[in-house]
Amino acid sequence: MGCRTRRPARQLVRLTRSTGDVSPTVEVDGASSGRGAWLCRDEDGRVSSECVDAAVGAKQFARAWKTSLDVQDIEAIRRAIDNSPTDE
């Protein structure tokens, strides 16, 4: 999504967003339903920071999830990505 590069599914990470009572929740590669946003993995199996930055800058998360995002949403995305396990 961020870098707009086509890759095999195993090289991608799916993020989904749900709105909670307190703050939005972003799931990374979890068994979650809803609209997804796909990002590239880097060589270490983690979400590519370049891909995230490109997606945030181009407002692609808002487009993929069909909603407007605020600073709290972007922080939730970054927290979820920072806490996500690597693909090994």
Image (spheres, rainbow, N blue to C red):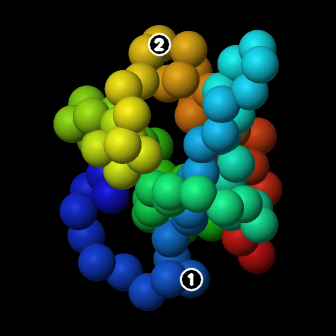
Q: Point out residue 87 in the picture as x, y percentages from the top left corner.
A: 71, 70
Query: Quadrant of the rendered structure where residue 6 is?
Result: bottom left
User: With respect to residue 85, does 69 lie above or below?
Assistant: above
Secondary structure found at label 1: helix
Q: Point out residue 16 in the picture as x, y percentages from the top left corner.
A: 59, 51
Residue 29 in sight here: yes
Q: Which amino acid does label 2 sit on?
A: Val
Q: Point out residue 59 in the picture as x, y percentages from the top left corner.
A: 27, 34
Q: Mark 1 points at which residue?
A: 10
Q: Residue at x 74, y 27 (%)?
A: 20
Mark drawn on residue 75: none
Q: Mark 2 points at which residue?
A: 71
Q: Which amino acid does label 1 sit on?
A: Arg
Asked whether, in this view, residue 18 is left or right of residue 30, the answer is left
Asked whether, in this view, residue 72 is left or right of residue 33, the answer is left
Name the image quarter holding the C terminus. Answer: bottom right
